Amino acid sequence: MKETSIKVLVILGHPRKDSYNAALAESYVAGARAAGAHVEFLHVADLHFDLHVQIPSPQDQFEEEDLKEAKRLVKWADHLVFVYPTWWGNMPALLKGFIDRVFVPGFAFYEIQPDAFKKLLSPKTAQLIITMDTPVLIDRLINGAPSRRSLQNATLKFCGVSPVRSMLISPVKHSSDEKKEEWLTKAYHKGKALENGILTPWEKLMDQIMPWIKAIRLQFYPMTFFAYAIGAFLYAELAGSFNPWIFVLGYLVLFVIEVITVFSNDYLDRETDRLNKHFSTFSGGSRVLVDGVLSEKAYTNSLKYLLVVLAVLCVFMGIFAIASAMQVLLVTVLLFLIAVSYTAAPLRFSYNGWGEIVVGFTHSFAVIICGFVYQGGALNNIYSWVVGIPLFFSIVPAIIMAGIPDHDADRAAGKGTLVVRLGKVRATYLAGLSVLLSMSSVLLLKKDVLLDWVYSDIIYVAFLHGGWLLYLLYQYINKADKPARIDGIMGIALMYILWYTLVPFFNLL
């Protein structure tokens, strides 16, 4: 979009046409037109409509002609400008009624599921020009700035309008004419600034970066890091040596492998993710592809670049390897092939009932072995394998239960997860069995002197956590009407894993 083609809608929310707010709006309009923007001006007081939502669903209420025109202008605009006073800590009833009637479901947003909404006004931006007599600092600290926050956060950003900038003018009532003229000039320059575009260079950069951050799904990476570190620190404990540079280089390799795996899963699972109506932070993919935030071409190109980066990092790992370069490359290549085969052909583990086991393996045994071997350890060292047993069994329950919300979409897409193959109840029993195996395996490992120290007695607290998780799984099994979303169980299951990463990590550190 060229800067001079910016479409701006200025909405005056003050009931009186001769108000200072009207003068501010006119100043902004003059500045925006001087910047070459296409400007429409809407004085809400001129519109004829019922301010009140008279029926349970506001989108079904009779829509007056003026509201139809207001919606057309909102849809047309790239940049929304609201000019209004603060009365009794909030916007005037006139503007509130306008928002209630215009920003309705189906136009400004729609509900996908109880805690997920499609933002229909993205990528519009907004400017608020708000007058008040309360000092700005008092309004913010004592009142909580409801006039600004209700429109900025609870309305505009909720509907996808971002960024939302604010120009706060206070106190107006006892200000001098010179001060008022100064604010009018400032409003003019706010409009004139559109000649440089709406977004700052930093905001443009973040607009490019944030979808990729979301796609990477960083919330799942700490588990990999701690498991990798356990392997590296275990070697240091046994051999008395630790190479920090190899540690960092090795983790970069694993990080890139995990990113490739996440991107590959998102791309190959895009059809089941589109069908998924019960997605959450824990399941259903990153959504950036199915929501159209990033294109399929962007994904495939990024995968090509990441493969090149991974190849370069592997070359460096081979050059600087402490142990046999062949052994280092062997464990790295095997991890990569197993990880991407979660959804990639020909193995497609997640489609034939092995996906949960593969995730458990790659996030426990595999990364621990990498940490151990990268530092110079032997692949056949028994400690580097058995230390990951409790972690493996602690991961599997969370991965199994993540298939519960995805069940309908996975079955429709032909994805044979354990939940699809076994059914929700039997899969939940299997998750419970894995919790029990995680605890019992710790008890067995603690018979060894070294492993007893690695897990220490604090690991017994994890048994209380495990008992809590088992109770939640039992409750779920016995529910006649099983919920599609199980966020509480998922949160507890994922936190359960932390015991089997953080306790060995800090003991070996």
Image (spheres, helix red, strand yellow):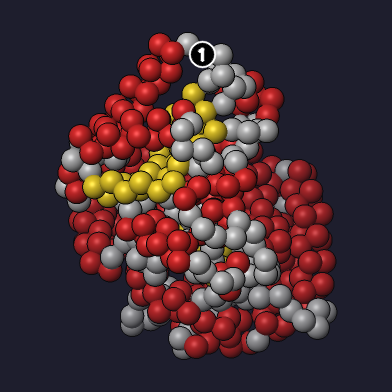
* Percent coordinates x, y for residue 360 in the rendering: 55, 66
Residue 71, picture quadrant? bottom left
Name the residue type under label 1: Ser
Residue 217, picture quadrant? bottom left
* Percent coordinates x, y for residue 438 in the rendering: 70, 62
Q: Say which residue label 1 marks.
A: 175
Residue at image position (45%, 42%) is: 12
* Res. 289 in view: yes
Residue at image position (39%, 56%) is: 74
Q: Is residue 487 left or right of residue 331?
A: right
Residue 75, picture quadrant? bottom left
Residue at image position (76%, 59%) is: 466
Q: Is residue 81 left or right of residue 316?
A: right
On screen, 397 above or below 13? Answer: below
Q: Which quadrant: the C terminus?
A: top right
* Percent coordinates x, y for residue 287 in the rendering: 43, 65
Q: Nearer the viewer, residue 368 or 98?
A: 98
Q: Is residue 235 left or right of residue 35?
A: right
* Percent coordinates x, y for residue 106 in the rendering: 50, 69
Q: Nearer the viewer, residue 344 or 3?
A: 3
The local crowd at label 1, few if under 14, some if 14 to 19, many if 20 or more residues have their Cα within 10 Å, is few
On screen, 417 above or below 71? Answer: below
Local SS, label 1 = loop
* Res. 376 in view: no
Residue at image position (34%, 42%) is: 206
